[in-house]
Amino acid sequence: MPRRLTRLETEVLVFRRMILLLDDEGDYDVSEEDWLSVAPNCVMAISAGATDHYASVTVEIWDGPPPLLDGWESGKAGRVRLDSGYLQIQPTDTHVLRIGPPGQYEVRAYSKGRARIAALTPRAGIEQLRGVESFLFQFWPAELSD
């Protein structure tokens, strides 16, 4: 049974519609194809909101694939290479998380509040938008195929 090793709950300023989880040891390049983009050293979530706002962000580190969750509007998954194994939440959070040693990791991301934040922006002020949108990122070591 997989175990959750670490859980961080924080609030992040969503700036220019983005939340970035960056490993700054290596290069990264992501595109805005969907609300979740995964590239080497970077996981990017795109907000449904049209203006800057604060969102709830939770990051979990697991030793294996966590169980799938209900109660979230959207779920996406991908595989990310981390050159240092440390991630920093950008643009404004000061937390640096040790995901594990350098290597390949699976990531599953969930979001909720997307329809509501889209409906409220750009009319509502930044304080009225606080916590309307939420994100959960779960990481665990990728199984290497032969």
Image (cartoon, rainbow, N blue to C red):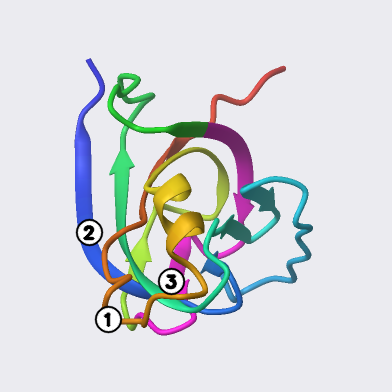
Q: Please give the name of the residue rendered at 49% of the width and 81% of the height, measured from the top-left corner.
A: 91
Q: Mark 3 highlights which residue?
A: 89
Is tag 1's residue or tag 3's residue first in the polypeptide sequence? 3
Is tag 2's residue or tag 1's residue first in the polypeptide sequence? 2
> Depth check: 127 or 107 in front?
127
Residue kind at label 3, given as amino acid type: Ile
Quarter location, residue 56:
bottom left
Image quarter (top left, top right, bottom left or bottom right) of the C terminus: top right
Residue kind at label 2, given as amino acid type: Leu
Q: Mark 1 highlights which residue?
A: 127
> Depth check: 136 or 21 in front?
136
The x and y percentages for residue 97 are: 34, 65
Image quarter (top left, top right, bottom left or bottom right) of the N terminus: top left
Whether 38 is drawn above or below 64: the answer is below
Q: Is residue 48 magenta?
A: no
Count residues near mark 3 (Cα–Cα under 10 Å), then give few for <14, some for 14-19, many for 20+. many
Q: Is residue 102 left or right of residue 10?
A: right
**Badge 3 element:** strand
**Badge 1 element:** loop
Q: Mark 2 highlights which residue?
A: 8
Q: Please give the name of the residue rendered at 35% of the width and 61% of the height, measured from the top-left corner.
A: 98
Which is closer to the viewer, label 2 or label 1? 1
